[in-house]
Amino acid sequence: MSDLSHAHHVVIVGAGFGGLEVVHRLARAPVRITIIDQRNYHLFQPLLYQVATASLATSEIAWPVRHLLRKRKEVTTLLAVVTGIDSEDGKVLLEDGGVVAYDTLVLATGARHAYFGHDEWESHAPGLKTLEDATTIRRRILLSFERAERETDPERRAALLTFVIVGGGPTGVELAGTIAELAHENLREDFRHIDTRKARIVLIEAGPRILPSFTEDLSTYAYAALERLGVEIELGRPVRECTGNGVAFDDRKLSAKVILWAAGVRASSAADWLGVPADHANRIKVEPDLSAPGYPEIFVIGDTATIDGWQGKPVPGIAPAAKQQGRHVATTIKIRLRGDASPRPFRYKHSGSLATIGKRSAVIDFGWIRIRGWIAWWIWGLAHIYFVIGVRNRLAVALNWLWIYASGDRSARLITQGEQRPKLR
């Protein structure tokens, strides 16, 4: 391999779908690459909810970044936390005082859940963006059943068997459906003092319908499918309070010991690092070529960016969009290295929207065709398996899903983190 010590240095912050796509597409380009992430793994976020609900193990949806890039000798992987950008000197600032100089910078730092000005709700209603979030949620769900098994007070037991999901988008719908199946089917023979089929799963959505990004007929189908699973749906009811004892919406209060947040996201601090315009979710309003305003050498992709690159509408914050943006940025970098600095506007091609409703049903909107039911569920499953990294992981996920579908058994029901003792109060 030729010496690349003086080659154009591309620094990528974030090892998600977008960041890794840039690395992949820059293979054999005359560059050296440094990828920085605060975690040592790449996460397949679309399947996080299955870890949270005990269907999959963490190792089946996450892979060490170093291992994925082990054969790319021009790539350096750093485990570090980025705290800022010195755009004048072209340096990335790290939490431990270190700096990494760049010629081209790609910010793919993702997003976290947003509580609309009520950050104090996070401790009571965790969201789902990281493996830590998923294992926290799994622990809360399973411990709630364990505590209910020992609880003798009917009201406290009812609260322990009430699960509230705030937000009716794809994540909220998927969580509600799979928790309902876990309670009403998978766990019904495991306990002696409680009937898990009496558990209440309540989905609260502030808008007029669930899955608002889908067509109205698919939204209506999803509503009916969730009701068949025993999910209670509250529409047009924004939550006004979350506590350790439950939620309040409208003039009602609902006692619940497990509250899950799926109602909104907020981008990382990248906009603050650069001092550039951002939208209400702190996503950088990028230029048509995905560069940061005023910084042509800095690109912003994925959940960190917002751009009207899809028929005049904002590009959705989904994995295929991040991968397309990563591909576009890598191509732009290679073209610039050849001396062509002409702008290349990004155009997003939407492949479709998918959401699953338990293990028997899903909805898919390809634009030209809409599919629902068990056929949609199989297409959804095949699409997700296709994007899982590695043959072994694809086989593991596929076998797990088939086993759960056939037997109803979920082998990942382990309480392995944090406080495990089933305190009653």
Image (cartoon, helix red, strand yellow):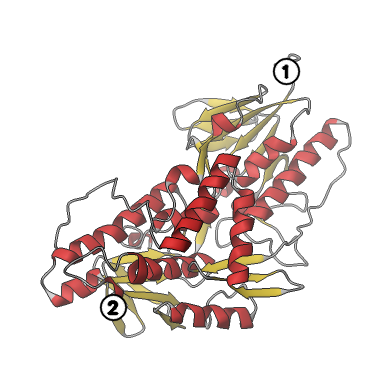
- Residue 210: give x, y in percent of width and height: 52, 77
**Rounded to the nearest whole Å, what is the CA distance between mark 2 and mark 1?**
61 Å
Residue at the far bottom: name it.
251
* Residue under numbered circle 2: 254
Residue drawn at (45%, 70%) of the image: 177
- Residue 400: give x, y in percent of width and height: 47, 53
Which amino acid, by three-letter code, is at mark 2?
Answer: Leu
Label 2 SS: strand
- Residue 78: give x, y in percent of width and height: 53, 28
Label 1 SS: loop
Residue at the far left: name it.
152
Residue drawn at (61%, 66%) of the image: 354
Q: For the residue carrying disc 1, how many other residues have a C-alpha within 10 Å: few (<14), some (14-19), or many (20+)? A: some
Q: How many marks?
A: 2
415 vs 232, left or right, is: left
Q: Quadrant of residue 158?
A: bottom left
Q: Quadrant of residue 297?
A: top right
Residue 4, numbered circle: 1
Q: Relative to the observer, which residue lies in front, 104 or 49?
A: 49
212 is higher (above) or lower (below) than 147: below
